[in-house]
Amino acid sequence: MEPTRLRPVRLDAGRSPDDHPCADLLHYGADLALMNYLLQDLRVLVRQAATGDAVLRPYQTITWHVHGLKRRTVMCDPAPLLRGSDVWVVGFLGDRRSTDEANEVDEFEIDVIAEFREYPGILSYSSIELIGNQWANLVVHREVADREAWRHSPVHIEAAENLAPRVYRSVRIHNGRVLGGPIGSNTVIVELTKYWDYDSDPIWHAIRVLPEGLTGTLSQPWAG
């Protein structure tokens, strides 16, 4: 859920801002671990389909639990995920304010997922539940233009402009790619991060470009 109207502050690639902890460089370690766990969920399903051990249908939703926490993957367009081509990703991480408001986001997410049918460049959507009723999401898409088209959709704008400031204290959105797609063994490369601090007055929005890209490995996101 990415707001569209605020003019962003440009952050240094190697420095954390003093007054907005949500944009601290230390977040990259945990965020990359979460994104790679979501990628790994997708990778398992795609490889099972490649070997004939699973059949993946367009817009199929697959849910399961790990350590009592919910995981979900929506296979919007499985066929391109099997080809070994580079894909682009969007990782969403937000600090929710309360359980009641979080439920409002969960209900709205159903509309967001349903809207993917209108944007064929979106290949998959994965989410992971964390302790404290927090969640992280990963969208995999075919081209950079796909995420721009989706970002300007009516449902996405409603979520970003009206819902997110009431539900989240802050939001981090990572844009990047996966070389060779989820069928391969590469991890997420983050190339740009966008931040929103909704507890700031006025709301603070910033962008950090990572010219060399940033990668990470798997860890245990549910244990922190």
Image (cartoon, rainbow, N blue to C red):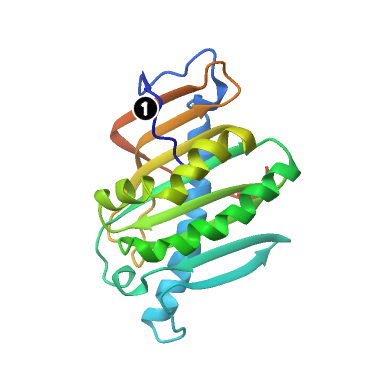
Report the number of numbered marks: 1
Residue found farthest to the bottom? 52
Secondary-structure class at tag 1? strand
Residue 75, above or below 108:
below
Q: Residue at x 57, y 40 (%)?
A: 163
Image quadrant in which the C terminus is located: top right
Q: Relative to the observer, which residue lies in front, 109 or 130? A: 109
Asked whether residue 218 appears in the rendered view, the answer is: no
**Crowding near pointer 1: few (<14 within 10 Å), some, many (20+)?**
many
Pinpoint residue 9: horizontal percent, then vertical percent.
38, 19
Position of residue 135 in the picture relative to residue 122 (left or right): right
Residue 222, above or below 195:
below
Q: Residue at x 53, y 71 (%)?
A: 61
Q: Relative to the observer, which residue lies in front, 11 or 165? A: 165
Q: Amino acid at mark 1?
A: Arg
Pinpoint residue 210: horizontal percent, then vertical percent.
32, 31
Pinpoint residue 130: horizontal percent, then vertical percent.
66, 49
Q: Residue at x 37, y 27 (%)?
A: 208
Q: Residue at x 57, y 64 (%)?
A: 72
Residue 31, above or below 121:
above
Pinpoint residue 116: horizontal percent, then vertical percent.
41, 62
- The image quarter containing residue 169 is top right
Mark 1 = which residue?
A: 208
Asked whether residue 192 appears in the rendered view, the answer is: yes
Residue 103, above or below 17:
below
